[in-house]
Amino acid sequence: MTPAARLQAAIEILDALNATAMPADRFIRDWFRRRRYAGSKDRAAVAERVFDVLRHRSSFAWRMRSDGLVIASLLREEASPESIRALFTGDGYGPPPLNEEEMNAINSPPQGGPLLHVHGEYPQWLKPELRRAFGDRLLDEMVVLQSRAPIDLRVNTLKADHNDVLNELRAEGYDAEPTRYSPFAIRIPYGTTGLDKTTLFTFGAFEVQDEASQIAALLVDATPGTRVLDLAAGAGGKSLAIAAQMQNEGEIIATDIDARRLAQIAERAKRAGVTIILPRPREAGERAGVRGFVEAAPPPHPDPLPHIGAGEGISLFDRVLVDAPCSGTGTWRRQPELRWRLTPERLAALKATQARLLEDGARQTKPRGRLIYATCSILPSENEDQIAAFLARHSDFAVHPSREVWAHSIRTEPPPRIDQFFRATPLTTGTDGFFTAILERLG
């Protein structure tokens, strides 16, 4: 592909992303699968351009006073007006010639500096909530969220030792370092490829999982023999981490309304050497109680548990994890498209779902058991506000301080700001943005 053709591909992908909810990285992958003429360098260059625009869409639109986001990305690279014009000719599958409005915008930068939400690259309507979360640190937090996230691995202690995996990765030429807080995490620089082709991965020695997500799983504090319900398990990343904590002894029921994602657990569990996870899809809109489970086939467990099914004699769980669907604001480094897809209406719907899941989780938690609520959000309305509202409805639950679980069960250096709750951001912890609350049922 010529440089101009690469620009046109980026423009087409960005236009198409406006009409889909698919993650940008997956959409780009599928887009190129239908266009086999593009080589690996072409794909990398186009993807880099697309993600650059997604990370800086607000300031690029401010620079061009409208659309023309790809043009603004070239200006950010200090391309001259003449070189930009030479790429926009319509020749060789490139973009059409620049119009007068675009040329005027290129030649006449806007006067004055951008507003805070433009500099911070977040939707303007979110400013009050973000100000609640960060106060005077708002811009600093938002700037770090524009950076590229590293790749974090979780060493699977059912099959490998942390130091052994770290040394083996280094021996294979990977720039691998231990992370600061999770005792099982290894960090690899952004852009590293080939990890899924390594013998270590095939053997099940590690999974890709951000350190903050690992910490949330650690705070579940599930010991061998525990009964755990993972109420919104997705593809099972936290279920696998919890199974390793439990030394593969006990049982984990993993539920989700997305049967396609849940189906990935069987293969991942087999690779990890985990046999205690039972996937149970359920219908959208149903309660997350056991009566709503739909039999998964085939489960990785040798036999379905007898108390899952008819609904009679249902026992409760020692630990219930509500890893709730959320805005994903804490993952903006990895999925920058999410910042522009979030709307007030979408946020309201997510908060309603979170409240319902907390109610469902409470019904499944045994006395003296724990309900753990987690999001990859940095917004108080999805985090602290949800917990406050839940506790106002449930006098039979109380906060179990996250710092106490850390001191008693994890015992490594605690993350900053871990107290009643665990809060993480790229600026404070070097991880994705995350929130975790531990609620204990009294009785």
Image (spheres, helix red, strand yellow):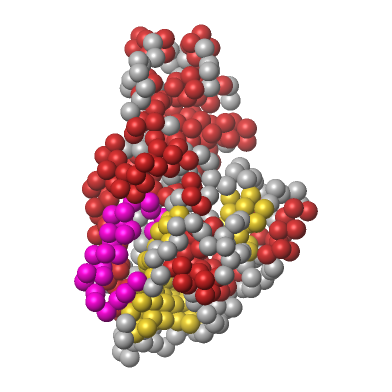
Classify 93 as above or below 388: above
Magenta stretch: give its range. Answer: 375-399
Q: Quadrant of residue 53?
A: top left
In which quadrant is the C terminus drawn? Answer: bottom left
Residue drawn at point x = 53 percent, y = 41 percent = 148
Give percent across and percent down for residue 100: 35, 9
Residue 54 rendering spot, x and y as whole percentages: 43, 35
Q: Vertical placement of 158 versus 249: above or below?
A: above
Which residue sits furthest left? 393
Which quadrant of the view contains residue 382?
A: bottom left
Query: In the rendered view, does 159 fall on the left or right side of 382?
Result: right
- Of residues 74 and 139, the one drawn nearer to the viewer in this rendering: 139
Does 394 appear in magenta?
yes
Quick check: can you spot residue 299? no
Q: Name the side, left or right, on which 348 lies relative to 116.
A: left
Drawn side of residue 190 relative to residue 331, left or right: right
- 327 with respect to 207 (left or right): left
Task: Find residue 390 and report its horizontal and vertical position in percent.
Answer: 26, 68
Q: Nearer the viewer, residue 242 or 257?
A: 242
Give the image quarter of residue 166: bottom right
Residue at x 38% of width, y 53% of height: 377
The residue furthest right is 171
Question: 225 or 277: nearer the eye?
Answer: 225
